[in-house]
Image (tube, rainbow, N blue to C red):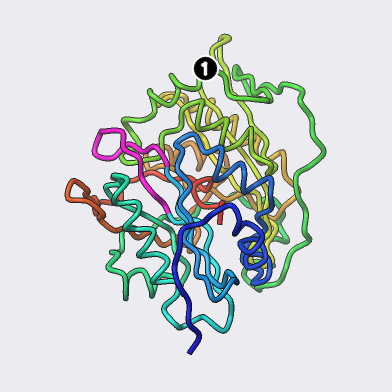
Amino acid sequence: MPSFSVELYRPERRAGFFELMHGVGRSHIDDAEFDWWFDRNPVGRRLISLGIDGERVVGVAAMSFFRMILDGAEREVAIPVHVATEAPYRRQGIFSELELNNEREAAADGSPVTITFPNAASHRIFVGRLGWVDLPGRRVWARPLRAAGVVRYFARRPSPRGGLVPESREPRRYGDVQVEWLDRFPPEADEIWRAAAPGYGNHVIRDAQFLNWRYADTPRTYRRFGASRDGRLRAVAVVGHTVKQGVSSGFLADLVSEPDAEAERVALLRRAAAELEADALIALPPRTQRGSFLRAGFLPTNRKIRFVGKILNPDGRLDPRPAAWHFTLGDFDFF
């Protein structure tokens, strides 16, 4: 049976980290993304546990901290992100050991809970071995963009790769709403998030600081838009493109809007769809905004994303109600 020890990441292990992550094909992370994600995260701490055999890195499990609103109060919450294990070490308990080490470190740093969105394989470990609990899954909604894409989806045939259309920064009008390109999110985004927050329940804080780190300073490719009426910014949105399981898909990474800004939401959703050459645009709409998504051509799909959590400190609580949590696809696509 392979042997290993567990240690926290040190800079001299950087080359081994990348060798493992790229060798197992689980992540596209490179130097620029590592520095952005782990070193420039506005919350601060980098938490990466490594499995070491001799001088080789044979396992990785990382957590990142996010500012969240939990039960109405701001807390810093650790969330698992990049994980990988070298093939000979799988089914030897290495992921469990790394994850438990991260959980101990996160608890010592004051994280009240931890949450994640596992695949089928990791779900069995989180819930079956590590004491996590299932929470209400999130249903994916989609707006079909190519008629043939619907046929391909149900036939499980791959789609043409597609992507984002050529960039255009010209403002567009949708009725009395103007949608403009954003290089960065302005300070007004703070007020939009504060207005939206009471309807979100437990959620990652989406103020300008977070939005700019997550979607403007990133080495990844996103397009950012703001919707204004009468010269006042009332909603912002972010769109990206990916290929998952052979399906070329746009994804609405984020949409933050004032509660009564339905026309602005619909305008942003239409602009997001216009940015894509893909089979569909997918999203996770909040319950209170599903009418806006229906107006913009979205429908619920049969796909749900698993959601699990674990209490790390005595003051932590995991609300089991579906309406108690709000996430967007931007909370998922760091995997």
**Measuring 43% from the left and 19% from the top, which residue is drawn there?**
191
Name the chief secondary structure element in magenta: strand
Tell me if residue 62 is in the magenta stretch.
Answer: no
Q: Is residue 24 above or below residue 142?
A: below
Query: Where's residue 139, x and y in %?
Result: 44, 56
Other residues around mark 1 within 10 Å, as few (<14) / some (14–19) / many (≥20): few
Is residue 307 depicted above or below 214 in this figure? below
Q: Is residue 149 left or right of residue 74?
A: right
Quarter of image, res 204: top left
Return the residue at label 1: 187
Q: Quadrant of the C terminus?
A: bottom right
What's under tag 1, amino acid-wise? Pro
Residue 37: image location, x then y, percent: 57, 44
Say what secondary structure mark 1 lies in.
loop
Is 75 covered by the magenta stretch? Answer: yes
The range drawn in magenta is 66-79
Q: Closer to the camera, 15 or 172?
A: 15
Nearer to us in this view, 46 or 177: 46
Residue depicted at 25% across the width and 55% down the height: 311
Name which residue lies at 57% across and 19% down: 186
Q: Provide residue 220's location: percent of width, then percent of height.
A: 68, 44
